[in-house]
Amino acid sequence: MERDMTLNELAEQLGVPARQIRFLIAEGILPPAAKTGRAADGYDGTHVLNGQRYLALHRMGMKPGSIKVLMAFDDAVPILQSGGVELRVDPGVAPEAIDIETVLGAVEAALRAYVAKG
């Protein structure tokens, strides 16, 4: 079984200061620790993998806000792939809560804006 890490151990594994881990948690990029308190923090492999992914994307020049959006879609359920476009739905959204007409309008507007940029 994998042992939980403290904040400092996670920071050391990722090669960043502990304050950067706190920033990533505050921004919702990393989940909070499973446990709290000095030496009882519950960081695990998920934190390491997500932290490594964030750092790799950041080194490629992506801004933190863009990385947050990209990483938020990791658990989204793909429901359509067509013409190089993929439509995904957040698994936390109940199907009956989706206003289809509003979503279709937003998708159409976004695609038109993208195509207009050439």
Image (spheres, grey):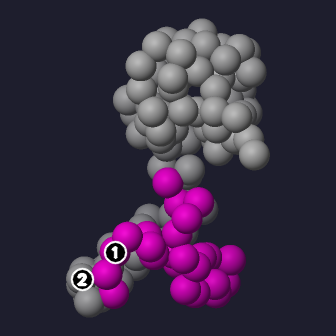
Q: Residue 92 placed where, x, y %?
A: 37, 70
Q: Is residue 73 magenta?
A: yes
**Element class at badge 1:** loop
Q: Is residue 41 left or right of residue 45?
A: left
Q: Which structural element holds mark 2?
A: helix
Q: Is residue 1 left or right of residue 36?
A: right
Is residue 112 shown above or below 36? below
Query: What amino acid is labelled 1 in the image?
Result: Val
> Which residue lies at the image location 55% right of the left edge and 65% below the top edge?
75
* Residue beneath the point at 38% across and 29% down: 26
- Expressed as whole percent of the image width and height from the top left, the position of residue 105 reads 30, 80
Vertical order, 90 against 46 (above or below): below
Q: Which residues are magenta?
A: 72-95
Give the camera-side residue of 96 and 5: 5
Q: Amino acid at mark 2?
A: Ala
Q: Against 52, is 84 above or below?
A: below
Can you tell which mark lies on residue 93?
A: 1
